[in-house]
Amino acid sequence: MKTIDVCLSPELMHLYTVEEKSVVVVDILRATSSMTTAFAHGVESIYPVAKLDDCRNMKEKGYLIAGERDGEKVADFDLGNSPFEYMNESLKGKQVALTTTNGTQAIAKSIGAKEIIIGAFLNLSAVAEHLIKSNNDILIVCAGWKGKVNLEDTIFAGALIEKLKNHFSLACDAPLVAQHLYLCAKDDLVKFLSASSHVKRLNRLNIHEDMEFCLTIDTYKVVPVLVDGILKIR
Amino acid sequence: MKTIDVCLSPELMHLYTVEEKSVVVVDILRATSSMTTAFAHGVESIYPVAKLDDCRNMKEKGYLIAGERDGEKVADFDLGNSPFEYMNESLKGKQVALTTTNGTQAIAKSIGAKEIIIGAFLNLSAVAEHLIKSNNDILIVCAGWKGKVNLEDTIFAGALIEKLKNHFSLACDAPLVAQHLYLCAKDDLVKFLSASSHVKRLNRLNIHEDMEFCLTIDTYKVVPVLVDGILKIR
C-alpha cells in the first residue's frame, strides 16, 4: 500500500522527499482556492511566481498579473487573491502570473515531485479521485502562514486523508494530527475556523465571504497540475 | 494578558523568539518524563548534552552518563531513557549527564529564554502552577521526532493549554491545533496514542510500560528548571 504524509509547514520540507511522489499543495486561504476557482471559470494557465517583481515583469509578456502580500491585493496588479475575482467570463483563455505570501512558496519547495497538484476544499473529491488513480506515495504540503502551522490547511489535509484512508496508509504522526483535527472540525468548518488566527486576519480585511466560500466542498471538478512550471488543468 | 504559543517542532524554532519568555520543553516519550521522574526520586542535577561523545566525556567528571539514540540505550552508558531506571534510591544526590535523540536538542534551541522548564504529563499541574506564578509569555517547545511533529508532545501542549487558558491568550494557530488534539485524546490517552508512529516504534522495543507511565498525569510535583546550563528543581 502506498503512503500518505503531511508536511505541516514549508519550513519542514527539508525533512521530506518529494521524488516519485504526488505532492498536493494547499493554501486554503486563499491561493489554492482561488487557483481552483480560476481554472473552473476558464483561465488557461497560471504561472506561480515566488517574488513580487518577477510577477510584475510578466505583464509585458501578456500575462494578467495577480497576487497579494499579507492578505492584501498588490496595488498595481490586475487581480488579488480573492476567489470571487476569478469568477469572471473575461478571464476565459487568459494566462495569469500569480504570487502569494505562502502558496507560491510552497509550490516552489515541491519542485522535483513526480507530480504537483493544487488542492482546496473546492475540488476535494476531484483531487482525491486523481490521487487514487495516480497511486503514488502522497505528500500534502500545507502552505501555512509565514512558516507557521495553520488550522485551515491542516484541516484540509485531514479531509483529504479521510477520502484516501482506504487506499493509502499513514506515513507518520502528522497525518494523524490532521485527520483528528478534521474530525473535530467537519460538522461546521466555518465555525471551527472562526477561531483561527488567519481568519481573524481576514476578518480585519472584510473578507469573511471569501473564507466561507473557500470552505465549500466540491464546488468544482478541476485538478490543476504543474507542468514545466505552469499550472494547467488535466 | 500574556500569551501562550506552541512550537510543534524544533525545526520551526527560527520562527519564534524566546527572549523574556518561559519556555517549556516537552519530550513525552521519554526524555522529559524521565527527567521529571529522576528529580522526583532525588537526582540532584541533570546536565543535558546534545552530542553523544560530549556526554560520554562527563563520566570522568563524576557524572552518571545517560542517554539513548533512536529509542535504545547507548551500550556503555550507566542509564538509558526509561523513567523506570530513574526510580532508584541509589541515584539520590547524583549528577547525571543526559543525551537523547530529540529532547536535549530542543533544550539547546531554547537557550536565551527567561526561563526553561521541563514539562511532562507526570508534572503537568506543577508546571501549570509555576507558569501562572511566573506570568511570562509562554512558548511550549515540542521535541518531536527527528524534526517531525509528533502526536504525544502536541497532545501534552494541548493539555497544558487547557490548564492555562483562563490565564493566557493563544498566540497563534498551533496552540489551537494542540488544544483540539488534546480534547480528542483526553478520555483515553493510551488508546489515542497507540496509533502514533513513535509508540509503534517503542512497542517494537518492548517498552509499552514506559509509554503508559509517561501518560500518567500529576504523579510528581517537581518542576525542573535550567540554570546555567544545568537542570535542577526549584
Image: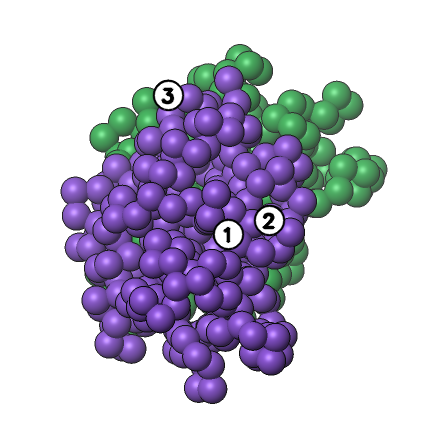
Chain colours: A purple, B green
Q: Which residue is mark 1?
A: A232
Q: CA distance from mark 3 to mark 1?
A: 28 Å
Q: Amino acid at mark 3?
A: Asn
Upstream in sequence: badge 2 or badge 1:
2
Residue at figure coordinates x 44%, y 86% from the top left: A75
Residue drawn 59% across and 44% down? Answer: B147
Mark 3, secondary structure of its residue: loop
- The residue to which callout 2 is attached is A227
Give whichever of A154, B83 is nearer the camera.
A154
Vertical relation: A27 (above or below) A7: below
Position of residue B70 measured from the top left corner of the image (x, y, whole percent) = 65, 28
Q: What is the three-letter code of the residue carrying label 1?
A: Lys
Question: Within 10 Å of the Cα at label 1, are there few (<14), some (14-19), or many (20+) other Cα atoms?
Answer: many
Rendered view: A68 above or below B60: below
Comparing A151 with B140, the one in front is: A151
* Whether label 3 touches label 2, CB < 8 Å: no
What is the quadrant of residue B101 in the picture? top right
**For mark 3, does the 10 Å Cα neighbourhood hold few (<14), some (14 to 19), or many (20 or more) residues?**
few
Does residue B50 appear anywhere in the picture? yes
Residue bearing the label numbered 3: A166
Q: Are marks 2 and 1 in contact (CB under 8 Å)?
A: yes
Dot 1 falls on a residue whose secondary structure is strand
